[in-house]
Image: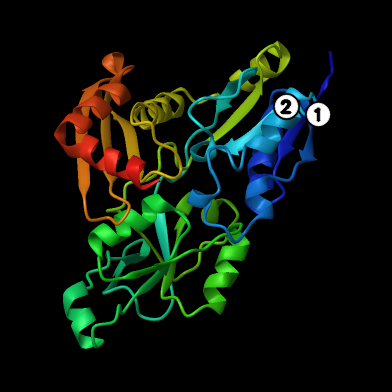
Amino acid sequence: MNKVIRIGTRESQLAVWQATQVKNLLSQFGFTAELVYIKSEGDIDLKTPLYEMGVQGIFTRSLDIALLNNRIDLAVHSLKDVPTQLPKGIVTAAILKRASHKDLLVFKGELPAAITESGNGASYSPLTIDPARATAQSGGHSPITIATSSIRRKAQWLNRYPNHTIENLRGNVNTRLQKLADSHWNGAIFAAAGLERIGLRPAQSIELDWMLPAPAQGAIVVACRNEDQYAIEACQLFNDDHTALCTAIERDFLRALLGGCSTPISALASIVNDEVHFEGNILSLDGKEKASIEKTVAINNSNDLGVIAAKEMLENGGQVIADKIRNAK
């Protein structure tokens, strides 16, 4: 059967790029596919901060409805945007090999403390600004303003630079870059994978190696109806097992903490020499409190790693922070 597989996508440049990757992968295995464009609530409202929008599924809900109404056969998402509990009737068909999991600071002016030249070209050192000294020199006012709509990035930044100011920044990648260019801000934080995938990473940018990413950041997921065996079997041909395992662990950690996009929870699992190394944390909304966990286990014993790590972190300071976040909502 030469069925045309309908791939649903948001209309942003990045979303279309991701859906096109899936279309190309299907084509490599002999399947015919076409893109179907669906607007999402997250694309329509560009002013309200994500954490005030009941953000769970804000970028996936419209595609979920299109799937369940049989308007499309596949939905392509950034996995970090997908709720840990999929809607009834929808399943994961494939997870693509992960790109960079890192967060990126795009800056203006002379924000980084140092830029050094390496054999592979320019490499940038992390920010080494002394917040207390910088604030004193500026007459008591915050010297640095950074923009992001992510409550996780905001909390981690304020944990490291408590005297800085954070501004809200919404919109697709292109819109946010333009808003940064037009603003008084010193910089803005983006997912490295998003900028790099569509060739928009500015020269003035540094990877924030100290910032732990959102669970599943950098991974693309393909979802379909649970009874659509044709789509499931087609997509399983390009499913990446290592990425699927690592992102499952990270999302288990998130689910065990009852967290979502409006909770400053971070997680990263990586596979090295048949072992899975996991790092996770939760921060208070203002970044002042932080609980962290690190664990390494054999890959064969890693299925419950996310849940185990979450329980251990809750017992070692995480529960207090989680309770404060719930009470603040």
Query: Which element type, helix, strand or loop, lies under badge 1?
Result: loop
What's under tag 1, amino acid-wise?
Answer: Arg
Give the image quarter of residue 252: top left
Quick check: 118 left or right of 75? left
Residue in view at x 74 percent, y 33 percent: 7
The residue that disc 1 covers is: 71
Q: CA distance from mark 1 to mark 2?
A: 6 Å
What's under tag 2, amino acid-wise?
Answer: Leu
User: Is residue 220 visible to the viewer in this orientation of the structure?
Assistant: yes
The residue that disc 2 covers is: 67
The image shows residue 30 at horizontal and vertical percentages of 75, 23
Quick check: 24 left or right of 253? right
Query: Which element type, helix, strand or loop, lies under badge 2?
Result: helix
Residue in view at x 36 percent, y 61 percent: 120
Question: Dot 2: within a 10 Å radius of its alpha carbon, few (fewer than 14), some, or many (20 or more) residues?
Answer: many
In this orientation, which residue lies closer to the viewer: 285 or 252? 285
Which quadrant: the C terminus? top left
